[in-house]
Image (cartoon, helix red, strand yellow):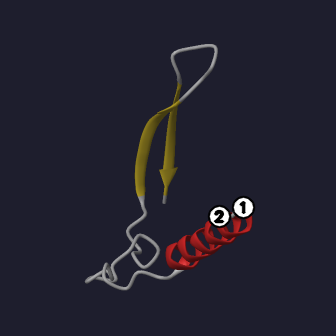
Amino acid sequence: MKRNILFLTGLWCSVVIIVGCQKNQIHEPVDNHTSKASIAWEGVYTGTIPCADCEGIKTQITLS
């Protein structure tokens, strides 16, 4: 009885892993426009980086 339960549990885990690792082709992007393909990276970007000892570190990056 223990062997059957152990075998079925192993089989179930294997099926879940195989199904979970398959590529889902239903959600293909319609437009291939991404930030890597775009040349318009120029600009000034601002934000706050989290900090453990303070409210945050204000950061500004300029790309030209």
Q: Which residue is mark 2?
A: 5
Please state the horizontal and vertical placement of residue 13, each as a whole percent of the image. 61, 68
Dot 1: element: helix
From this viewpoint, which residue is outermost toward the front? 1
Give the residue drawn at x 49%, y 38%.
60
Tell whether label 2 touches label 1 (CB within 8 Å). yes
Give the residue drawn at x 51%, y 16%.
55
Measure the alpha-carbon separation of dots 1 and 2. Answer: 5 Å
Q: Is residue 12 above or below residue 61?
A: below
**Image quarter of the N terminus:** bottom right
Please state the horizontal and vertical placement of residue 8, each as a whole percent of the image. 62, 70
Which of 41/55 is in front? 55
Dot 2: element: helix
| Amino acid at pointer 2 | Ile
Q: Which residue is mark 1?
A: 2
Q: Is residue 17 above or below residue 44?
A: below
Q: Which mark is residue 47?
A: none
